[in-house]
Image (cartoon, rainbow, N blue to C red):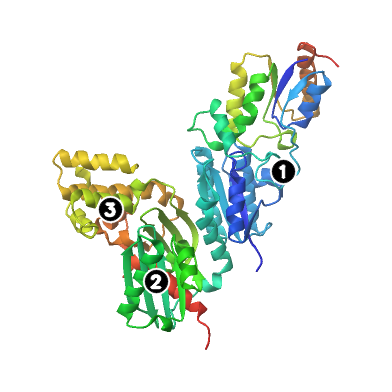
Amino acid sequence: MSKVRIAQLSCGPEYSGVQNEIAEAARSVDAEIFFPDITLKDIRSGFDMFGLDVRSPDLKLAIARARALVEGTVEADAVFIATCFRCAEAAIVRNELRRYIHENSRLPVVSYSFTERTTAGTLLTRMEALTTIARRRALLAREVQEGITMGVDSGSSTTKAVVMRDNQIIGTGWLPTIAVLKSAEDAIELALKEAGIPRDEIQAVGTTGYGRFLVGEKIGADLIQEELTVNSKGAVYLADSQHGPSTVIDIGGMDNKAISVQDGIPGSFTMGGICAGASGRFLEMTAKRLGVDITELGPLAMKGMSTMVPMNSYCIVFGTQSLVNALAAGSTPEDVAAAACHSVAEQVFEQQLQEVDIKEPVLMVGGTSLIQGLVRAMGDLLQTDILVPPHSQYIGAVGSALLASGFIREP
Amino acid sequence: MAKVFIYPTTSLILSDLVARFGHQPLSAALQVRENIQTAGLESPPLQITPEDPKKGLKYAAVEVPSGVRGRMSLYGPMIEEAEAAVIIHDADFSFGCMGCARTNELIQFLLRKREIPILDLRYPRSDEEGVEFVAAIKKFLEELPGGGV
């Protein structure tokens, strides 16, 4: 299999000491990073024609390289845009280039702002998603689940398993992730029990999520794939929105994903990168402090007014402090629950959704999509109706089971 | 002989001029080639590690982007060492180029704070301006202690 060629458009990674980390992340998914070869003359014309009058020559170089990719004078399978964290000039260029490439080519693109602490491990899932999109377009085009397949999503907070037969979900299992392998085994048992079929009747298995490699190797999965492409596929499949554009938002236990999808395939995406205060973990803490189960937080929030409680969960510690202060000042649990939901939605809106193009329908998936207060808050911020597909908490497992049916071997 | 910081630090022409007039150029010995096949226009040939941006904290605070601090870990010590500087504004990429505008601003500011002799010149756009450009650099370098061909 030939290596996937990822074009790097960047400013600052080599002087930040992270160029090797970027290259290593690409190597680990059998891809290679390359710098589109252009001339000084191309920089002047490419930059002038793009029309963004930036001062940094390396950003002018990135703009010219993006033009070369879009115009096809340089060939690539995917694009990785990386600039220094906290550089405003670079953030503008990063965002505009991502949009420009997304709108004018079929190249999958991901952008990232790094610090000197960025490691290959941090970049792995993003690189894996880029290579999956480039390498497995045929697999990602699958729209119907066939045979009997199983999908396992070993997430940071919960482990989900789904058994599917002939395009129907026939068994599900959902447990907190404690010991990765044990939780996966238990979730699988639950799903098989509900489906009423023995394990040896499963014809193909797919795994995704943080524990995908460990669980996948243990259970002999046919497909081990990162959650960006799998969740996109699962989301549009369950929402019956497999054709045309859509936006998938997954606020997870440890990180968040926002994915701009076209015909079920991610075009651009952003993942994680912000504090735990903007993740499902903060909502778990809120529920615990309010003395309710996480499943009760959503209905509670629906009865409250977020504007009644000042809360900024940019940091999980300060967010919890706001929560405690509000309760001490006499705020109602309903208003506090609503404020927590609004705060998480606002962080994701301000810091992640700006990096993808929001196109309707907007689908919210993952366990947090069951918290109605969070879905309402996100809808208010985006000024659109958010669609939560059925079985949205099983999105990764369903996507894995769907894609795994491409691996069923003929008897 | 004076230690002369040149800006852009990648300019081989400036570096050569400074050396010809008997001084020590403080520069990054990098050539900006016609074809750019590296991450940036003046990517360092040496391997910078994540430790280098931390060394740059001496010149720029932690909220400054890591690329600026990584560059300052190289150029900061040169600025401290400099006894004079030649700064060329709006230079053509082929003359010499430094990739990050924010670093460039900081370098020039720190040079001015040193209160050393500094020659500011605009990059020439015609043959006539080119002659005046070289003459101005020659005069500046000759007047520095130990200057002259």
On the same chain, marks 2 and 3? The answer is yes
On the same chain, marks 2 and 1? The answer is yes
Assess whether mark 1 and mark 2 are in contact (beta carbons under 8 angstroms). no
Q: Which residue is mark 2?
A: A398
Which chain hosts label 3?
A
Residue type, label 2: Val
First along the sequence among labels 2 and 3? 3
Q: Nearer the viewer, mark 3 or mark 1?
A: 3
Of residues A375 and A215, the one drawn nearer to the viewer in this rendering: A215
Secondary structure of the residue carrying tag 2 is helix
First along the sequence among labels 2 and 1? 1
Q: Nearer the viewer, mark 2 or mark 3?
A: 3
Q: Tag 1: Cα neighbours inside 10 Å, few (<14), some, or many (≥20)?
A: some
Expressed as whole percent of the image width and height from the top left, the position of residue A27 reads 62, 57
Secondary structure of the residue carrying tag 3 is helix
Separation of disc 2 and disc 1 at Cα? 49 Å
Q: Which residue is mark 3?
A: A284
Q: Which residue is mark 1?
A: A40
On the same chain, marks 3 and 1? The answer is yes
Q: Residue at x 54, y 65 (%)?
A: A132
Q: Residue at x 80, y 27 (%)?
A: B16
Which chain hosts label 1?
A
Q: Tag 2: Cα neighbours inside 10 Å, few (<14), some, or many (≥20)?
A: many
